[in-house]
Image (cartoon, grey):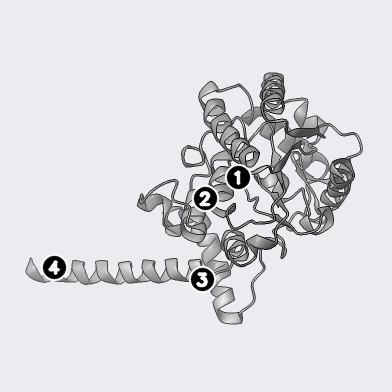
Amino acid sequence: MKRYLTYVTIFACIIAVLLAAGEAIVRHYPNSYQYKCEWMDHNASQVKTLVLGGSHTYYGIIPSELADSTFSLANVTQHPEHDYWLLQHYIDNCTHLNTVILPVDETNLFEPALADGDEWFRCAYYNIYMGCDLNGSNPIYNLEIANLPTFNRKFKAALDYALTGQATLDCDSLGFGNGFTVKNAMKGKSLHINAISKAERHQGVDSTCIAHNELYLDKTLALCHERGIRVIMVTPPMLKEYTDKVDPQRFVTLQTIVKKFVAKYGVEYYDNLNDARFQGVDFHDPDHLSVQGAHKYTAILKDTIK
């Protein structure tokens, strides 16, 4: 029995060492969260315009084409609570910040907190790479390996990086998510099917989720108001075939919330949700712009806010 326990202990130690090595390898692989954190640590004082939000602004607004000294702190599935944490974390160092661009759409206002949603594993990215302590010391939100499917995918890429020293960062030097090219965009039937599938997931209005997201949106706007920072709220373009199938009550609620904040803080709001200028190759999928669409949207936004 004693020998058996010894073997089990040795085996467990080997597994633990392998898992720790795998975690270290994956963490060493470059990613947009770590890049943006390090960039802001060194360059926050240069930023005049800051883009926040989730994937719709991450893939939809190109900082280098929008305005002088613009940087995007947006990231995939970034919720209002993380927008607020990041702004609060960096604002004292953003000594020249005069404009914040903030998205409001049918996802970021109506989804549950990141830790409670389908992409809960992204909490670890904020904790590990950006020092964001919203989820405390819970190991599941502090380990890459906590979600095996994403860990395995990143581990393969990290091994190639360890061997070749070559890695493809998800964003450009100013934080724009440049992976949604026209070449890899959805087309035809697949785009139609995806529009229906996504719209089916975006039905109903959960007052608990809205209250949570609205609270952090209000905190962000209040912080900007206190500092005399101009806030521009935007709803980026989405495929009409998709928006037509989303629960219309969401859009009614969204507009009600926006009007309240416009009245309360005097923020500007620009709605391009069903902008007819965006068609076909402008979209990567039903609710995200392709790089081509991002060029077009950024140019329109620049013209509008100027």
CA gap, disc 3 to disc 1? 22 Å
Dot 1 falls on a residue whose secondary structure is: loop
Q: Nearer the viewer, mark 4 or mark 3?
A: 3
Q: Quadrant of the C terminus?
A: top right
**Point 70% across, 62% down: residue:** 46
Quadrant in the rendering for residue 276 = top right
Give residue 282's position: percent from left, percent from top.
85, 46
**Point 69% across, 52% down: residue:** 97
The residue under label 3 is 28
Mark 1 in CB contact with mark 2 (< 8 angstroms) = yes
Please name the amino acid that badge 2 sits on: Arg
The residue under label 1 is 77
Residue 122: assigned label: 2
The tag earlier along the polypeptide, 3 or 2, is 3
Please name the amino acid that badge 3 sits on: His
Furthest toward the bottom, the residue is 164
The residue under label 4 is 4
User: Foreground: 237 or 147?
Assistant: 237
